[in-house]
Amino acid sequence: MVKLAEHTISLLRLIRWPNLLIVAATQILIRQCVLVPLLAGAHMETQLSPVLFTLLVIATVFISAGGYAINDYFDRKIDRINKPGSLIVGIHIYPRHAMAYHLFFSISGVLLGTYVAFRIGQIYLCLVFFMVSGLLWFYSTTYKRELLLGNVIVALLTALVPFMVLLFEMPLLAREYGSSANEITRYLMIWVVGFSLFAFLLNLTREIVKDAQDFEGDQAYGKRTVAVAWGIKAARRIAVMLILITIALLVIAWLKFIGDRATLIYFSVMIVIPLFYVAFMLLKPEEESVYPKVNFLLKIIMITGLGYSVAANLIIKNLMK
């Protein structure tokens, strides 16, 4: 029993269970706090049934878990240098077991996603699950060693998580409401793409910061990361530039699409000020100890950015009165 418990804990660490909770929470909040109130304002409802939506969330979580497992499988040598204290594969979990977990989660995720696509009569959507699973494999084996390519792929896949919810709703809305759904679909697109773009930029920033943090191991094993190819200072400056772009886009979004006081306060206190603080930390004289703090803060900011969906729900309902 003790060994089983230890193995279970190691497995949960391998598949990054806190990140998987964030993935699930992202899709649930996008549906319940953005799509549902916006559609209600247009006297419409979400068309994907609760059961099929739950399966969609599980499919996304499973494919993400498979991606984390295969990434650690191929990174076990580099991780002996970059993060020896948190090494899992080869210490707590046999490499062949990590590969088996990758196959189980990835295949299960693809099958569940395919089932959802089939049930809603949009079988072509199953290609998304095949594509994501394939990208995660090639990212772990090849793409992450290429300059910027791996960073961009991870950021794009992160941005896909909230967009998946709308992707599976759009054809159903069109089928149920016809052309009358066109205007609300465009409005939904603006909101969801906003969350996806925020997730893309913040995750890309985190990836580049992690490149700077993992410089030693990446250089030893010939990875062409931003930090290895252009230097740690350049990596930090690029991360700061991405932070400033994120802040600028938040300001534009508020001015052009939202404009209410509650959003201004939320953006300022929960996102913009913390982002400026992260940028300040990255511009300070180089200290290796700053990277874990920056990564942690960026993850918290991503969560507070997602948390805006709850505030948006209240704002949307207020506007609809």
Image (cartoon, grey):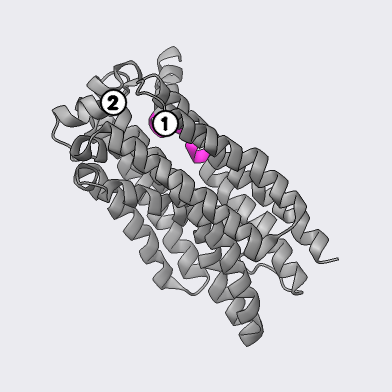
- Percent position (x, y) of residue 102? 32, 41
Is the residue marked by circle 1 packed among few (<14), some (14-19), or many (20+) residues within 10 Å? many
Boundaries of the magenta span? 14-21
Q: Main secondary structure of the magenta part?
A: helix
Q: Is residue 245 left or right of residue 30?
A: left
Most distant residue in the bottom direction: 179
- Percent position (x, y) of residue 251? 59, 54
Q: Is residue 15 magenta?
A: yes
Compared to 314, does 42 lie above or below? Answer: below
Compared to 81, does 189 lie above or below? Answer: below
- What numbered label is drawn on residue 308? none
Going 28% across and 47% down the picture, which residue do you hit?
A: 150
Q: Is residue 72 magenta?
A: no
Q: Is residue 81 left or right of residue 311?
A: left
Q: Is residue 13 left or right of residue 133?
A: right
Going 82% across and 60% down the picture, which residue do you hit?
A: 318
Pick whichever of labels 2 and 1 is earlier in the sequence: 2
Compared to 282, does 128 lie above or below? Answer: below
Q: Amino acid at mark 2?
A: Val
| Of 197 and 139, the residue lying toward us | 197
Q: Is residue 148 left or right of residue 263?
A: left
- The residue where tag 1 is placed is 282
Depth check, mark 2 against mark 1: the one in front is 1
User: Quarter of the image containing the C terminus?
Assistant: bottom right
- The residue where tag 2 is placed is 89
| Of 144 and 19, the residue lying toward us | 144
- Percent position (x, y) of residue 215? 24, 29
Res 303 seen here: yes
